[in-house]
């Protein structure tokens, strides 16, 4: 007889639970209280870094202080950075120091490590505790009779504010600059901060010794080889014998940097000359390469691939003259451009002469255009923010492949001929960055006229203005807005207005989500007609997601009217969508995806745009 022994159900169930617990324990991460718990000789990678409890210092600010880094989530192709215990312990000290310079002297930082498959997840817990507040600010000046403006420090730091290193140092720098601008080149500012952590209070004091007033001495330039020192010296905003001024030095440096001839510009006041009343200046520069090459491009669903190639000579024939050659190709707009710039036209500092010679090819639904243009103009810089230009346009234009439905809708058109006339414009730009502005605004206005006594086959005028505004609203977010309006009309019959100077909207550089020029009046065959009045605008919120990675959401609107002085506000069309950009040394690389609120007949329900630089 065969004997069998069965395991009681409850024991069998317990055995299964024990096996599962053992398997789960093998797979679960090992907790380590300190870096000392890591196994010597083994290599660990950084999986993630988390912060907890930080309210007054952002994650981004904390990570910027650490050399221990996690791999960005979108760079999955890269190897994870190595976790170095010594580096991590130094990082913790840096975080403690960061909190101190932000006024939180009693901040306590703890950490915990989770390890799985030789990957370390770092959890940093921060107890910020109470900040140190300013108890008093004492400002003393020696008996020179000069006294700084109260706004020098009262708008930066006042009793009751959190004591931060940045504000503490900024007051000293502002005091120094204020006396520099009064001619006190030898001013000394001594500062002291007594921090009592037992009551979380700080007493601050500054002592200013202005020294004797001084004037500018002679200025010499060091480091030039291919560029004449005279090109540098003529940009100075001060003269020998004038009262010493830090502002004048900064304005002079900005003008020299703007020449784009130098990679480095440094002003060195020579304070130890034996005569404290005269301060000679030495300008040290490092020249850029004489020639430069730029290659760029983009993509959108209409133009497809856009390719640019530009060659430039920064100092053509000397005297700071510039010459550049540009070639651009796309399915819609292609061009060859030669640009020459002569600074100090007629010996006037703010005046420069510019000549553009270009060949344009435009292949759009209503027509194909071949245009040869010569565009000389004068640029005048009224201030560092405001400039204007005045020029004369001479071009020969030839239209081919004009859609018959356009001729039926608009009437007879001049398909070729010369165009002559003046053009004028103003640009006001206060933005803080030409490629990725965070604050400031740009106002532009331009007008052109053809014919009307200047000759040629076309007789018309056209005006356009645009406003852009950028505002840092906090939390890593930039609010960008723009509004553009334009109108024009013929000076004779309707055929005197060029088809290629009508207003068109939609697509690249206009209202995202619509096809190129596909917003506005069309023929019965759905071919764009353009118009004589135009309105466009955008509202966009740009937010920093992670380090150099930014995201955005936008709302665009626009419309075109066939009549002059008729902004079609009541007939606007809208589009919206997301965008992603990655900040590079040459500006943001960006992808936009636009969706029209009302899908146009015969068009796709979305459009995609890839470009280098912000959309606006």
Image: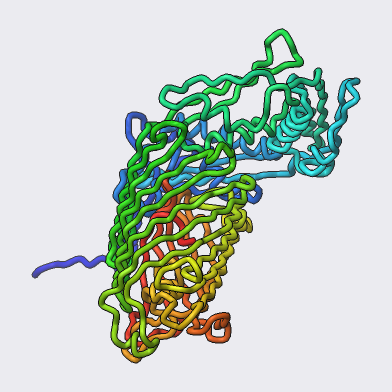
442 to 342, vertically: above or below: below
505 to 181, vertically: above or below: below
Q: Do we see residue 555 in this rendering?
A: no
In the image, taking residue 8 as reference, residue 511 lies left or right, namely right
Total labels drawn: 0
Q: Position of residue 197 (x, y in %)?
A: 77, 33
Determine which quarter of the picture holds residue 340: top left
**Residue occupying the point 74% across, 27% down:** 180
**Residue occupying the point 54% across, 39% down:** 346
Determine which quarter of the picture holds residue 514: bottom left
Q: Do we see residue 224 in this rendering?
A: yes
Q: Position of residue 435 (x, y in %)?
A: 48, 51
Q: Position of residue 152 (x, y in %)?
A: 80, 38
Q: Position of residue 491 (x, y in %)?
A: 51, 77
561 to 294, vertically: above or below: below
Q: Residue furthest left?
A: 1
**Residue occupying the point 80% across, 18% down:** 211
């Amino acid at each position: 007889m065969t004997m069998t022994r069965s395991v009681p159900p409850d024991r069998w169930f317990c055995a299964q639970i024990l096996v599962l617990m053992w398997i789960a324990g093998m797979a679960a991460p090992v907790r380590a209280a300190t870096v000392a718990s890591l196994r010597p000789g083994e290599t660990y990678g950084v999986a993630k870094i988390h912060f907890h409890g930080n309210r007054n210092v952002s994650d981004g600010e904390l990570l910027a202080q650490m050399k221990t880094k996690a791999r960005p989530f979108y760079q999955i192709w890269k190897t994870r950075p190595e976790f170095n215990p010594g580096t991590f312990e130094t990082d913790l000290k840096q975080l403690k120091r960061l909190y101190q310079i932000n006024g939180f002297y009693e901040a306590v930082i703890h950490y915990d490590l989770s390890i799985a498959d030789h990957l370390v997840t770092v959890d940093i817990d921060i107890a910020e505790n109470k900040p140190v507040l300013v108890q008093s600010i004492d400002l003393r000046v020696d008996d020179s009779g000069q006294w700084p403006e109260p706004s020098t420090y009262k708008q930066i730091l006042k009793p009751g504010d959190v004591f931060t290193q940045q504000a503490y140092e900024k007051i000293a720098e502002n005091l120094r600059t204020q006396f520099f601008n009064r001619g006190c080149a030898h001013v000394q500012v001594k500062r002291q901060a007594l921090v009592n952590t037992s009551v979380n209070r700080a007493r601050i004091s500054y002592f200013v010794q202005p020294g004797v007033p001084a004037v500018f001495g002679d200025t010499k330039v060091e480091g030039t080889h291919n560029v004449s020192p005279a090109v540098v010296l003529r940009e100075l905003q001060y003269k020998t014998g004038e009262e010493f001024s830090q502002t004048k030095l900064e304005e002079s440096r900005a003008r020299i940097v703007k020449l784009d001839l130098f990679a480095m510009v440094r002003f060195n006041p020579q304070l130890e000359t034996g005569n404290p009343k005269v301060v000679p200046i030495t300008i040290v520069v490092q020249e850029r390469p004489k020639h430069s090459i730029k290659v760029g491009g983009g993509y959108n669903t209409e133009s497809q691939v856009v390719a640019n190639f530009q060659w430039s000579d920064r100092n053509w024939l000397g005297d700071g003259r510039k010459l550049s050659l540009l070639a651009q190709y796309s399915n819609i707009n292609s061009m060859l451009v030669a640009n020459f710039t002569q600074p100090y036209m007629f010996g006037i500092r703010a005046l420069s002469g510019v000549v553009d010679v270009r060949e344009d090819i435009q292949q759009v639904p209503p027509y194909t255009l071949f245009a040869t243009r010569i565009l000389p103009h004068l640029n005048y810089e009224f201030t560092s923010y405001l400039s204007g230009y005045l020029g004369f346009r001479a071009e020969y234009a030839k239209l081919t492949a004009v859609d018959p439905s356009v001729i039926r809708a608009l009437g007879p058109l001049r398909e070729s001929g010369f165009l002559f006339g003046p053009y004028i414009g103003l640009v006001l730009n206060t933005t803080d960055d030409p490629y990725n502005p965070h604050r400031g605004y740009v106002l532009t206005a331009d007008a052109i006229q053809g014919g009307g006594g200047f000759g040629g086959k076309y007789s018309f005028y056209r005006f356009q203005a645009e406003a852009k505004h950028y505002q840092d609203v906090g939390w890593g977010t930039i609010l960008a807005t723009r509004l553009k309006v334009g109108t024009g009309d013929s000076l004779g019959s309707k055929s005197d207005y060029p088809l290629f100077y009508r207003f068109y909207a939609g697509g690249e550089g206009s209202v995202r989500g619509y096809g190129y020029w596909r917003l506005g009046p069309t023929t019965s065959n759905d071919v764009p007609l353009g118009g004589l009045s135009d309105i466009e605008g955008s509202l966009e919120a740009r937010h920093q997601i992670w380090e150099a990675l930014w995201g955005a959401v936008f709302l665009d609107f626009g419309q075109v009217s066939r009549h002059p002085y008729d902004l079609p506000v009541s007939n606007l069309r809208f589009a919206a969508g997301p965008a992603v950009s990655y900040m590079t040394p040459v500006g943001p690389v960006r992808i936009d995806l636009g969706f029209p609120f009302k899908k146009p007949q015969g068009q796709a329900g979305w459009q995609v745009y890839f470009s280098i630089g912000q959309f606006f």
